[in-house]
Image: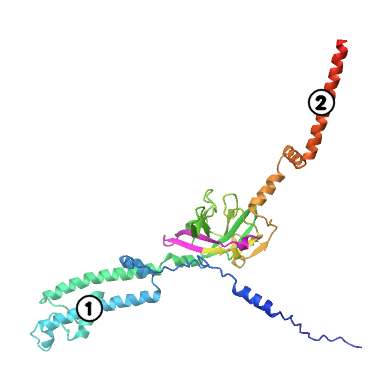
Amino acid sequence: MEQDVESPISIRQPKLPKQAREDVTKQKCTKRKVQRYVRKDGKCNVHHGNVRETYRYLSDIFTTLVDLKWRFNLLIFVMVYTVTWLFFGMIWWLIAYIRGDLDHLQDKEWSPCVDNLNGFVSAFLFSIETETTIGYGHRVITDKCPEGIILLLVQSVLGSIVNAFMVGCMFVKISQPKKRAETLVFSTNAVISMRDGKLCLMFRVGDLRNSHIVEASIRAKLIKSKQTKEGEFIPLNQTDINVGYDTGDDRLFLVSPLIISHEINQHSPFWEISKTQLPKEDLEIVVILEGMVEATGMTCQARSSYVTSEIMWGHRFTPVLTLEDGFYEVDYNSFHDTYETNTPSCSAKELAEIISRAEMPLSWSVSSKLNQHPELVNENEEKNQEDQTERNGDVANIENESKV
């Protein structure tokens, strides 16, 4: 009995002509790259160049140090303390050198400015002990040196200022609220679908921590270049997107993930955008979530953005909240998941016109049909005129008979 043996068959793709291959290559090369104004991680994609007034950064040196990267911040932290210790150590060594303390090291009857200071190294160690208030007890200042007492006071005051400045800078950098924003998540995509009979633009936000964001609020901006009626070109124009600030829905109780909805009405910038037109639009939606950190009371801000390729028409978000035995559980594995739903592909303006036509009264529809068919109107008018003439002739005959 024969058995069919399947042999692997390699299907070769048809080789394109040279001109067609060149066209495909040109299309790949000329594909427009999406340039974001705000990246998905919330960082603004804007670089400041040709800033001539650099002195403004030094006028706010504290904020400048806090904004530096960690490696530069740690380098400055170490350098400030080292330079301060070396500077005052040099002054302590100069005082001992000028007074002649270094020439009378073995003279027990000599009263030095600092006991047991026999060189620059010991002066440097004494400077560290003075500024850090360690006090080992081996090197100590005497009361026979007034210039040393003055220098001790100056170093103590300046050392306290340096400690307050640098430690405060490090504390603020460690406790920056932007680290709290790492646990505030936004959905990867935004969706457009029907909600309560209206087209809505929606995205989802969530908080991964058990400590809540107090007084949380959400805002949204449309970033799109425009040209005014006078011909002025405004790059990256910002337009507010209503996400509930007139109804209070922008104030969030962010305990579980929430879906933020923007109703596409006549005041919305998406009023005339349809499904086929959306990919052609060059726009970006920036969403901003603000609130106070419950643990520290500092204001926290998290940002994200959606370009046209990340707006899914005709989708909804998968539910993530389920009721368990005595508590609610959030499944963050489905936080970014969506599913398709029946959604008209026309714009919200066209959808509103279709609904308004369907809800028009019967009298309007009859008159509109008559307007669409003027021949019927003319025939009706001619029939009315004939009936009227016949009635007039009958009335005239009746009058003549009555006179006779």
Q: Is any atom of residue 70 visible in this view?
A: yes
Residue bearing mark 1? 87
Residue ID at (86%, 86%) = 4
Instruction: Give the residue drawn at x 22%, y 78%.
Output: 87
Image coords of residue 232 (percent x, y): 48, 56
Residue 265 at x, y percent in the picture: 60, 50
Q: Is residue 292 found inside the magenta-colored segment of the image?
A: yes
| Mark closest to the chain's N terminus, 1 or 2 | 1
Comparing 73 with 201, the one in front is 201
Q: Nearer the viewer, residue 338 or 51?
A: 51
- Residue located farthest toward the right when viewing the structure as drawn: 1
Classify 10 Å Cα crowding around label 2: few (below 14), some (14-19), many (20 and above): few
Where is residue 380? Give x, y as percent.
Answer: 81, 34
Quadrant in the picture for the N terminus: bottom right
Secondary structure found at label 1 = helix
Q: Amino acid at mark 1?
A: Phe
Identity of the amino acid at label 2?
Gln
Asked if residue 250 is positioned above or below residue 160 in the image, the reply reads above
Specify whether 48 is left or right of 261: left
Quarter of the rendering containing residue 323 = bottom right
Quadrant of res 191? bottom right
Outermost residue, top direction?
404
- The residue wearing badge 2 is 388
Where residue 404 appears, x then y in whole percent?
88, 10
**Residue 218 seen in the current view:** no
**Which residues are drawn in magenta?**
276-303
